Amino acid sequence: MPYSYDDQNIFAKILRGEIPNDTVLETEHSLAFRDIRPQAPVHVLVIPKGPYVTYDHFAQEASDAEIVDFNRAVGTVCKMEGVEAGGFRLISNAGEAGVQEVPHLHVHILAGRPLGRMLARA
Ligand code: DGP
């Protein structure tokens, strides 16, 4: 089934400048900003500017330039936030089982406190 992108999602609105965000980094193809409901002292979201729903969508259909830019943006944010010292977690939720709230690809960078085990049983 082809991926279907809803351009009314909240991150599309952020990218269009329709709602504000606390920007950490902006590059040619990516934007990083602080999560509105932080779950750790560092909680930054990194998103591509292109219309991709999930990580697999992006990895299959984005251009090489977008993929390089996005991964470099993640690396730059990790460096800016100093997360390598104490450790961090990188998460990308997708679809129903992944409990994805916003249907525009984003990775969460979480750091600054012990983050527990990777998965909690529902
Ligand atoms: P998820 O799709 O479940 O991976 O998480 C979406 C995250 O997006 C969640 O941690 C809260 C955050 N979020 C939702 N709406 C906004 C918003 O308007 N601004 C910001 N900065 N973050 C948001």
Image (cartoon, rainbow, N blue to C red):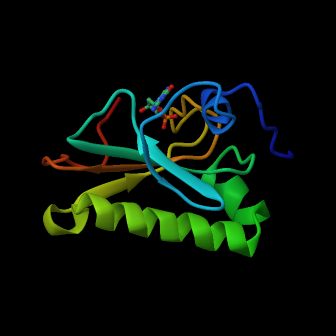
The N terminus lies in quadrant: top right
User: Is residue 112 found left or right of 42 in the rendered image?
Assistant: left
Vertically, is 122 above or below 41?
above
Where residue 61 sits, quadrant-wise, is bottom right
The image shows residue 102 at horizontal and vertical percentages of: 58, 31
User: Is residue 1 found left or right of 64 in the rendered image?
Assistant: right
The answer to which of 12 and 108 lies nearer the viewer is: 12
User: Is residue 89 found left or right of 16 in the rendered image?
Assistant: left
Residue at screen point 20% across, 41% down: 41
The answer to which of 17 and 79 lies nearer the viewer is: 17
The C terminus lies in quadrant: top left
The image shows residue 78 at horizontal and vertical percentages of: 33, 63
Vertically, is 9 above or below 31?
above
Q: Farthest residue in the right direction?
A: 2
Where residue 35 sits, quadrant-wise, is top left
Residue at screen point 68% across, 64% down: 59
